[in-house]
Image (cartoon, rainbow, N blue to C red):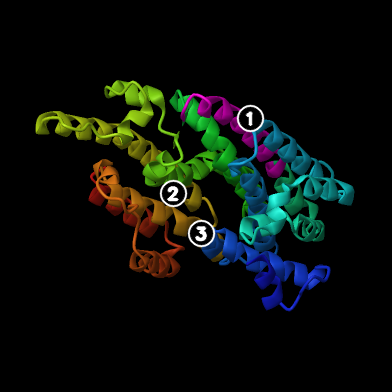
Amino acid sequence: MSKNILDTLGMGEEVLDGKKAWQYAEEILLLVSRTFALNINVLKGKLHKSILLAYLYLRIADTVEDDPDMNASEKEELLGLFADIFRTPDLKEEAVIAFEAALPESWRKSEHPYMNLCLHTHVVVPLLKELPEVYAAPVRDVTIEMCRGMAKFALRQEAALSSGWFTLESVADLDEYCYYVAGIVGKLLTNLFAADTCLIGDARKAQMQKLDVSFGLALQVANIVKDCVEDSARRVCFVPEEICRRHGFAHSYEMFVAPAGVSEEVRADFDARRAAVMGELVKKAWMHLDDAIAYTKLVPNLKMRTRLFCLWPLFMAAENMKLIGDGSGLFVSDKKMKISRDTVKKIIKSTSTHFYSDGWIEKSYSNLKKEAGV
C-alpha cells in the first residue's frame, strides 16, 4: 500500500513538498482514519489544514504508542523524539531526521498506512510552517502534551500487562487516560475555532473552554464502550476496576469470561452484573455528550462547516449509545455493535439542513436520549 499511495499520486520516490505534500496529507488521511476523515474534510481553508495536520501528528504518536513489538522505554524514547520536533516554531529538520531514523526497521518494509505516515513525517511536518502562528502554535502544543501522556500510559500498560492484563483502577484513571488521548483535542479545537473567526470573542471562548475537554471525552468514552469486547481480545480493559467491584467482579477482565456449567439463574445474574457495569460507562458517555452538545451550540451558527464538524461525530456517538442501550447487548454477539451506513447518511443529511438551529439540535439530541431510555 505504501508504494501504491505514492504511485497513484504520480510521485514515485521523488521529494514531496508544496502542493504534492498537501496532496499526500489528504490522501493518507483517508487511509489512516476510520471516521474522522469525513468531518475533517467538511472544513475548508486554514482550519481544515490545521486540524488535518494535527490529526496526522497525533496518529503518528498513537502508532508508536500502540505498537505491540516495542517495549515501553523504546516508545517513551520515540515519543520524546517526536515531541522534540514541535518544541520550536521552525520545526527543526534535524529533529525530524532523528525521529525517522529511530523508527523500527520492520516499519520500513511495512505497507500499512500508519507506518507509511510515520515514515513520511518529513513530508507532513514542514506543512505546519505554512500556517499562521495562531493556528500552528496550538497544534504544536497539543502534540507535545499528547506525546507526554502517551509515554506515561505506555509505561503503565507494560507494567500491567506483565501480570496479564492492562486495566485502570479508578474513574479518575480513566479520565486521565481519556484526557491525554482525546480531551486535549477538545482544547485544541477551541483554540483553532477561535483563530478561525472573530465571532468567537474572549467571553465565548472562555465558555467553550469550560466544556472542550468534555467534548473530547464524549467521543472517547463512547468508543471505549463500543470497543470493549474487541479490546479484551488483546487483554486490555479501560472499564475501571472500581466500577466492576461495585457489581461483584474482583477484576474488570472477569466480565469477558462467561461462567460455564452453571445454572440459568447464576448465568442470568452474571449477565445482569456485567450489563450494570457497562451501563455506568454508558451513563458517563451520555453525561459528556450533554456537555459536547452545549459546546457545539457555542460555535457561531454562521460557521456551518465548523458546526457540522462537531455535530457529525457527536450524533454518531449518541446513536451508538442508543443502540448499545444498557450495555447487555455488547456481549451477546461476536459482531461489534455499531450504527448502520443508513444512520450515518441520515445524520449527515439532517444536520446539514438544520445545523444553524440550536433548538433543532437540542430537540433531536433529547429525542435520542429518550429513545435510549436515558
Earlier in the chain: of badge 3 and badge 1, it is 3
Q: Nearer the viewer, residue 302 or 232?
A: 232
Per the rendered image, the range of residues in magenta is: 142-165
Nearer the viewer's eye, disc 2 or disc 1?
1
Confirm whether the magenta stretch covers residue 151.
Answer: yes
Asked whether residue 69 is in view, the answer is: yes
**Amino acid residing under circle 1:** Lys
- The residue that mark 1 highlights is 152
- The residue that mark 3 highlights is 34
Q: Secondary structure at mark 2?
A: helix
Q: Residues within 10 Å of mark 3 (few under 14, many from 20)?
A: few
Asked whether residue 301 is in view, the answer is: no
Q: Secondary structure at mark 3?
A: loop
- The residue that mark 2 highlights is 293
Q: Tell me how far mark 2 sits from mark 1, CA to CA.
A: 31 Å
As drawn, 59 above or below 130: above
Of the 4 image quadrants, the one containing the C terminus is top left
**Amino acid residing under circle 3:** Arg
Q: Main secondary structure of the magenta part?
A: helix
